[in-house]
Amino acid sequence: MDNRQKEINNYKDYKYGFSTDIENIQAPKGLNENVIKFISNIKKEPEWMLEFRLKAFERFKVLKEPDWQKPKFPKIDYQDLYYYSAPKSMKDKPKSLDELDPKLLETYKKLGIPLQEQARLNGIAVDAVFDSVSVATTFKDELTKQGIIFCPISEAIQNHPELVKKYLGSVIPTSDHFFATLNSAVFTDGSFVYIPEGVRCPMELSTYFRINASNTGQFERTLIIADKGSYVSYLEGCTAPMRDENQLHAANVELVALDDAEIKYSTVQNWYPGDKDGKGGIYNFVTKRGLCKGKNSKISWTQVETGSAITWKYPSCILKGDNSVGEFYSIAITNNHQKADTGTKMIHLGKNTKSKIISKGISAGSSDMTYRGLVDISSKAKNSTNYTQCDSLLMGNKCGAHTVPYIKNKNSESNIAHEATTSKISEEQLHYCQQRGLNPEEAVGLIVNGFCKEVLQQLPMEFAVEAQKLVGISLEGSVG
Amino acid sequence: MKEQLQKDFDKSIKNLSLSQKDIEIKKFCLDNFIDKGFPNKKEEDWKFSDLNQIIKNNIGELSFYNDQTSTNKVDTSVFVDGLEHNKIVFINGRIEKIDFEYEKKDQIEIIDESETINEFENSNSLSDLNNAFTNKCFKILVKKGYQLVKPLIIYHTTNSKIWSKNINLRLNFELDKESSLRLIDLFNDTSEKNFLNIFYNFELKENSVLKNYKVDKFENKNIKYSFNNIDQDKNSVSETFFLSSGSNFSKNEINCNLKGVYASAFVNGVFSLNNDKHHEIRSVINHLTENTKSYQLIKSVLDENSKAVYQGKIFVNSNAQKTDGYQLSKAILLNKESEFNAKPELEIYADDVKCSHGSASGSLNEDSIFYLMSRGLSYQQSIDLLINGFLLDVVEKITDSEIKNLIKNMIGIRE
């Protein structure tokens, strides 16, 4: 353990940069029908699930990797990846936390994730996904009492096939874009949440994702269904060890909100961003989409993106139900050689639908930040409104900040307003803070936190504190 | 279409006395165009329109050969009254008249540049088409320190002699140090179903001033594409104004390179559309050095099934510190079927800049209408007054008072 500790000290800047020596079971390298059958088989999936995967794979074969994005990356060899990796001890799933591999628990302890029972104080139910499998879910009993289902999606496929069958692929179909289709074919695990009619979920639900094994792609799939009149707040956190090669993370997240339901989805994404010279790091190509299916439903995305070598994702809302509301709050911070191309899509289909987009981008070092968004008000979406604000902050003249909004208005009774600014931290602000005794780095941290406040406010308490610290850490070394 | 292009190309080459080398260059451009075809939605800059489809729907079969051996009679009735001006007259794409009667003859030079081809950044396959088929290209050089006394109006006239034709034309302008030019492009079409493809190249030297007003006001069933490339040196100023209203389809593109310090570019535009029309403006302003400035304001009033698109981009190079870039697009949708799409884009690599954009679209404010009606105006009068005020804002940005009045009269805007 001493050596490992030393290693960690070497890489102080990314405190989650350790890997854990746990024996893994892996699928054969490469992507083909046999691997998909292997995954399906090891998960003991029913026939319809395998069909779902194979259908997606058929489609995947004819799709081409998209190349319109701003951050370019070397071609990924999809045959050179492991599509399934699981801790060996998980083969026979432990019944309780005590049976978990102590090393796993140690890993989560390092991550600061409260899996143990004393975590009750925190009041957060956690589902932890290690490489490809969900390893532990806490607070199950309490949730079950209310009829809430919160479990790994592989379990849900076994125990609640009627729900999974009905909603899986209903927001992100198997015929979607390249990475989403890849996920549909090979997804391994993820969280499943169902909130029954009229229930307000009593605690925050949370998932921690961790990529541990090398050369593995992580493909998790999350499905959240909020039935009529229910409410849920869901948190997601991610970390990965430091490795020289790039790793692929292509997850799919589907949200469905029925009549009067509300889903709040918060992400603090802190995958390994690569070292100072841009070596290594995670490719975070995630598809997140929410469907406001019912009347008066609401979906709210909040994201703090500080990690990953390349972040490429657009959490979207399809506002199908009348009077539905979509919100998107985002902070994206890039430093060193990180690249981010992120934003949202708000598709207004129902009447009186409203959407709000607040995006704050900060780029430092030699990084590149792009906000790319779509607001589309269809001809039937009478009386809809959208408000978009995207601000960028630049630090240094080697970085870039870009704004690429697409605004489509096909309805004369609807209003769209869009604003964007790009600026830097003014000398006066810095001077003022330093005069009061802050050092330059603290001053920048304070100003940036103020710049991001609108978004940080949207995060649940526990996360807000973490996110605020993260904002400071991510920008270390970018001043002066 | 390929055979048609080849056949028409051979025909037009025959009528021109070109050197072997020129023919080869033109042939090369033609092959390029055949290879790429008309721009379509797969290209980012044409995201909202498929030119192939538009040509098919509005024109049908397009032919590219233009018989330019015989002269056309210049119809003086189209000339603007009450404003003394110099003239260049294009009829059906053929230059019929160049007249700088109000200017000192030795200060303006007209150079035949038919042999050169233009290559622009941020352009598309239409520049290849243009290069392959234009037969004459002139460069108008305004000499050092000379400021034209009267504005120059370029009349783009088409008459009913042509049908389903592609007309390509090209002009180059060079404004030497301390010179200035006011230029109005006036479109006047009595023809139908033609496709005009126009490329202008402007070279602005130190301290020169260019004002370009493109007026497409009169109802017609043609489709138009126009590309302005402007290269700006130190302390030069360019002002571009679009009135986009008359044609069935029109796309105005402007690519402006601010290469010298303190150079500034202003782009203003009005879309006033009805009747299934589809118009676009796309602007790219490249801030390539320090202390440059750009300002863009586009306003649209859309009625009856019409569609307007504004794609604006501000690019700031990493050494273009102290850049000031601004972009605003506003649209009023009067009819349920009308549509406004915008893509205001910022691409910034320098940190000490002030760049912002805004975009808003929606219906007329009910409260404003109510207010005016409570003062005794009818519903229609109130709407007209509000639209008048909405558009006046852009027209007021025109810095030349003579031309401002001319354009105000054309749109029917009161103060």
Image (cartoon, coloured by chain):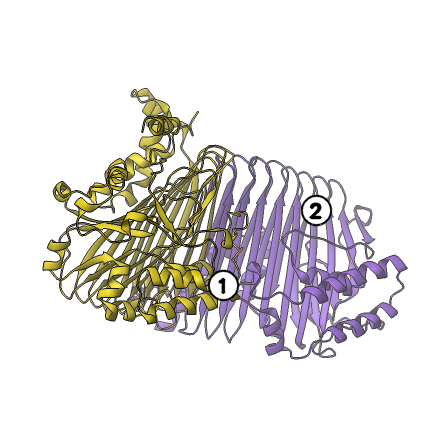
Q: Kindly identify which residue carries mark 2.
A: B203
Res B186 → quadrant: bottom right
Q: Nearer the viewer, mark 2 or mark 1?
A: 2
The chain letter corresponding to purple is B
Q: Residue at x 37, y 60 (%)?
A: A39
Residue A412: where, in percent of width, then height? 38, 69
Nearer-the-camera pick, A155 or B333:
A155
Nearer-the-camera pick, A8 or B287:
A8
Q: Secondary structure at mark 2?
A: strand
Tell me the quadrant of the picture where the N terminus of chain A can be found. Answer: top left
| First along the sequence among labels 2 and 1 | 2
Residue A10: where, in percent of width, then height? 39, 26
Relative to A259, B316 lies left or right: right
Subunit ID for the residue under disc 2: B
Q: Kindly identify which residue carries mark 1.
A: B413
The reply to whether residue A193 is in sight is yes
The reply to whether residue B415 is in sight is no
Q: CA distance from mark 2 to mark 1?
A: 33 Å
Q: Give the number of callouts.
A: 2
Q: Residue at x 74, y 68 (%)?
A: B93
Q: Tell me: residue B163, above or below residue B110.
A: below
Residue A173: where, in percent of width, then height? 38, 67
Type of amino acid under label 2:
Glu
